[in-house]
Image (spheres, grey):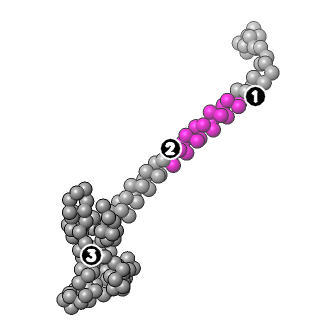
Amino acid sequence: MDVTDKNQEDWTPCRRGEVSSLVQALKGRRQAKKVQRRLVVTGALMAVAAVGYYFTGLRPTDQFKYGGIACSEVAQSAQEFVSGDLDDETQQQIDEHLAHCPRCRKLVDDLRKGSGRDTTTNLQIEGRQADRVAVTDAGYQNPHLVILLSSLSF
């Protein structure tokens, strides 16, 4: 008697639908593993994208420095620029900056129209008074954030 013959003697036929249910179970497991792999890859890509966005797009010290002057400096000097109280060199640097920076241009235009607040407006933050320049020096180098903060009432 051959080993193969012995295995065939022990073999019994499957019940009706047993093979198809095993196939479906294996397909389900395979599909679940595919979904799991895709979720892991998607999560990793989203984490990399979030970190990349943070380090390239949200760094508070990143500023445009058109005309040799940064946005924060333009925001600090905007009122003096509008009133003409700056020296010629700074006035020229701000003019050059405004030619390239639409956000700072809007700030200066708002100040010229009188719809903007004085850039030296004091803020009340958690019961303490903080000058706009102090907020800028504290690390919030985005002048537009400072202007937004100064327009809020606490």
Q: Secondary structure at mark 3?
A: loop
Q: Which residue is mark 1?
A: 20
Quadrant of residue 64 in the image? bottom left
Q: Secondary structure at mark 1?
A: helix
* Amino acid found under the numbered disc labelled 3: Thr
Which of the marked residues, 1 or 2, is nearer the chain's N terminus? 1
| Farthest residue, direction top | 1
* Amino acid found under the numbered disc labelled 1: Ser
Image disc number at residue 119: 3
Q: Is residue 136 above or below residue 66?
A: above
Q: Position of residue 54 (x, y in %)?
A: 37, 58
Q: Position of residue 29 (x, y in %)?
A: 62, 33
Which of the marked residues, 3 or 1, is nearer the chain's N terminus? 1
Write down the region rendered in magenta. 23-42
Q: Position of residue 124 (x, y in %)?
A: 25, 62
| Quadrant the N terminus occupies | top right
Q: Is residue 87 above or below residue 27?
A: below
Q: Is residue 44 above or below residue 136?
A: above
Q: Which residue is mark 2?
A: 40
Q: Residues within 10 Å of mark 3 (few under 14, many from 20)?
A: many
